[in-house]
Image (cartoon, helix red, strand yellow):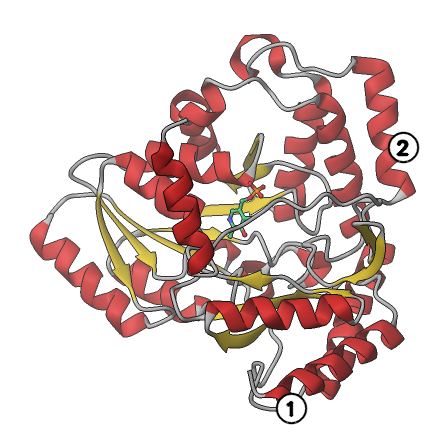
């Protein structure tokens, strides 16, 4: 291996930006074992505690028995198996859209969808904090890109006006998340829908961190605000609150058919294992049931316990999702803070560049419906200790 990589790795280490894999030795859930130590996990995106649920395992096992393990080909060849069809039908029904399409990951969804939606000569306008996969998909499309400061609708409008003037007749796609993955805040969706309609732009909303968490039965923020009909491209993942793996787009039939024909990450990739589709369908059925709604309320009860115990100043004033950033700033200090939590028996990761901007390193706490109130209170005590140390 060229010496160059070692030097670059050393450089990352000096800047406290080196990342390493951790081997987790336990099942999904709030109790985790890492390096032989038991920790309470405050880092997973399994917001409803579904990933380890018996009924999800059962659905996957039954499908393995019936359909085997691998899907054997891409979806357009012979890889579309009954569980894929059932999942897409269920997703469209759950999201009250004409059709749905699933991908092997949320990342593949962003890449395939944005590169199919726009091309050279078109314009894609993204929120500054949009997920890396959305940025990569937008770049791949070859469209002209514009970025507006996070959640600033007036700045978005400036770009829309510019796009209309500079690229008359071009397709314009606005790309946002409904709940932002590293800040946990929500988009001003009503204002954004209003302005994109006024300029005749399309809107893609990634509900990765809102699905299962926000809105009736966890349908997401667009449904919570009664705006789902006005969001042309609704995206999400099956890997977070749904507890499985994969990504999806829901919307009009013609959109879905276009993606089936043009989304390269869909066309040129082997279909996901049918057992995962079966497990995801079981999870959506659960979300859409009274038991699912009870579970979602349990998550929000837990968030209330957390909010009541947070030291002021370090964290947002109002929790808008299951993601709670604890702003630190300096990368080395963020690592030290994460280490302090580790020593106290909690797993709370430090989030650093390039996931967030340089100098905005933070701890990212995520809550699950399966945390016990005592565990949440214990982590808030550790936060007060952190506050005292003034990192
Ligand atoms: C996690 C995430 C993705 C990627 O989804 P995966 O299923 O993990 O590939 C896409 N968008 C956002 C906003 C995410 O947080």
Residue 44 screen position, x and y as percent: 70, 55
Residue 355 screen position, x and y as percent: 46, 56
Q: Is residue 312 above or below residue 174?
A: below
**251 relative to 129 in the view: left or right:** right
Which of the 4 image quarters holds residue 315? bottom right
The foreground one among 38 and 154 is 38
**What's the mark number on residue 388?**
1
Give whichever of discs 1 and 2 has the lower sequence position: 2
**What's the mark number on residue 215?**
none
Q: Secondary structure at mark 1?
A: helix
Residue 112 screen position, x and y as percent: 42, 32
**Which residue corresponds to mark 2?**
58
Which residue is at a point 52% across and 13% down the rendered structure image?
76
Which residue is at a point 61% across and 36% down the rendered structure image?
246
Q: CA distance from mark 1 to mark 2?
A: 47 Å
Which of the 4 image quarters holds residue 209? bottom right
Q: Is residue 180 above or below residue 54?
A: below
**276 relative to 1 in the view: left or right:** right
Q: Is residue 292 above or below residue 94?
A: below
């Amino acid at each position: 291996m060229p010496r160059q990589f070692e030097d670059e790795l050393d450089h990352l280490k000096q800047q406290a930006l080196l990342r390493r894999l951790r081997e987790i030795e336990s099942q999904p859930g709030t109790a985790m074992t890492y390096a032989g130590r038991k920790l309470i996990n405050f880092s997973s995106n399994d917001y409803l505690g579904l990933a380890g649920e018996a009924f999800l395992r059962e659905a996957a096992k039954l499908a393995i028995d019936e359909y085997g393990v691998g899907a054997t080909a891409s979806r357009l060849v012979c890889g579309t198996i009954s569980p894929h069809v059932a999942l897409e039908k269920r997703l469209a029904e759950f999201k009250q859209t004409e059709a749905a399409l699933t991908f092997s990951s949320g990342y593949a969804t962003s890449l395939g969808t944005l590169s199919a939606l726009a091309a050279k000569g078109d314009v894609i306008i993204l929120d500054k904090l949009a997920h890396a996969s959305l940025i990569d998909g937008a770049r791949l499309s070859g469209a002209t890109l514009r970025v507006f400061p996070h959640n600033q609708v007036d700045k978005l409008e400036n770009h829309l006006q510019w796009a209309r003037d500079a690229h008359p007749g071009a397709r314009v796609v606005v790309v946002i998340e409904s709940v932002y993955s590293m800040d946990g805040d929500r988009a001003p969706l009503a204002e954004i829908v209003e302005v994109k309609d006024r300029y005749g732009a399309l809107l893609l909303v990634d509900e990765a961190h809102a699905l299962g968490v926000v809105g009736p039965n966890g349908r997401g923020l667009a449904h919570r605000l009664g705006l789902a009909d006005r969001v042309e491209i609704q995206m999400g993942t099956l890997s977070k609150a749904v507890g499985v793996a994969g990504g999806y787009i829901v919307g009009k039939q013609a959109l879905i058919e276009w993606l089936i024909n043009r989304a390269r990450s869909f066309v040129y990739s082997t279909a996901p294992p049918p057992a995962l589709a079966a497990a995801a369908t079981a999870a959506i059925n659960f979300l859409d049931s009274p038991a699912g709604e009870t579970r979602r309320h349990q998550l929000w009860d837990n968030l209330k316990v957390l909010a009541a115990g947070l030291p002021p100043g370090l964290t947002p004033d109002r929790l808008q999702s299951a993601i709670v950033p604890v702003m630190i700033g300096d990368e080395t200090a963020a690592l030290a803070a994460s280490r302090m939590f580790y020593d106290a028996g909690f797993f709370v990761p430090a989030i650093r560049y390039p996931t967030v901007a340089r100098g905005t390193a933070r701890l990212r706490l995520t809550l699950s419906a399966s945390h016990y109130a005592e565990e949440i209170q214990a982590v808030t005590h550790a936060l007060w200790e952190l506050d005292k140390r003034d990192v």
